[in-house]
Amino acid sequence: MRYGVCATVESCKIISDAGYDYIELSVAGDLNPDLSDAEWLPIQRKIEQMPLVPEAFNSFVRSGHIVGEHVDEQRLKRYVSTALKRASFVGGSIIVFGSGGARQIPEGFSLEVANQQLVRFLQICADASEETGVTVVIEPLCSKECNNINLVSEGATLAREINRPGVRNLADTYHMEMEGESNNAIEESADVLAHVHTADSKRLAPGTGTYDHSAMFRSLARAKYNNRISIECNWEDALADRAYSALQHLKGCNEGITTQ
């Protein structure tokens, strides 16, 4: 298993010193697809100088619309193409499609049309993936944050519908906990599972709450998942104090569990 943290460029040394394998940065904040290549170049240089490779990126589409009456498909194509190309330039393999605001279905809008728009967006992502090798993973978000794709099982169904290698699914234990979804969903989505986010209960740092990470790792093992897992939590301004212990907690919970 490879362990990472959703964090900022400025936090990378702390994460590296704590022993993590990679950092998960932000598409909107770090790849900045709306900037020209010349404008992005200084940011690219900072990313390349980090002690860890940003193997994953979240916060994909922070502004604009993926569903609804105001979708600009040409802008989305440019944005997605640039995002995946820049991710590949700096060593990225995964882009997380959460983007709850951009994919929120407006009240009264056709659910059928919204689903068609989601599928179209993911087809655009799959096209860009073929050019870059970067995989886009669907992030099911709890209903408190978005009104569609709330369950891992729903994300898996959509990934199977797309049926292209560049679009896969993500399991986020915080959102699963919020929706009351069991770890069985991890095992049942094994065929399309390509990334994992985790936190402790109430989105605390791992090891500071009551979430059963050992049970999570047992389900991941049964799913034969042995790839990346990123901590996405509220560190309560104590990343430097808790990064190491959070990693040791996860490794301890995974100790002795095998994917064989």
Image (cartoon, rainbow, N blue to C red):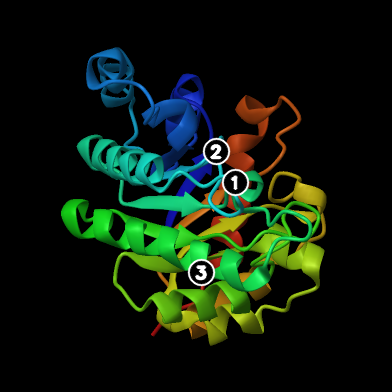
Q: Secondary structure at mark 3?
A: helix
* Quarter residue 183 falls in: bottom right
Camera-near label (1 vs 3) is 3
Residue at (72, 24) in percent of width and height: 237
Residue at (63, 42) in percent of width and height: 245
Nearest to the observer: residue 243 or residue 31: 31
**Hey, what amino acid is under mark 3?**
Gln
**Hey, what amino acid is under mark 1?**
Ala
Q: Is residue 148 above or below residue 258?
A: above
* Classed neighbour count for the residue bearing mark 1: other residues with Cα under 10 Å, few (<14), some (14–19), many (≥20): some
> On the image, numbered disc 3 is attached to which residue?
116
- Nearest to N terminus: mark 1 or mark 3: 1
Estimate the x, y position of residue 167 in percent, counting from the top left: 38, 66
> On the image, numbered disc 1 is attached to which residue?
102
Estimate the x, y position of residue 114 in percent, counting from the top left: 59, 64
Q: Is residue 175 left or right of residue 217?
A: right
User: Do the CB atoms of the residues marked 1 and 3 lie less than 8 Å apart?
Assistant: no
User: Do the CB atoms of the residues marked 1 and 2 lie less than 8 Å apart?
Assistant: yes
Q: Is residue 160 left or right of residue 144?
A: left
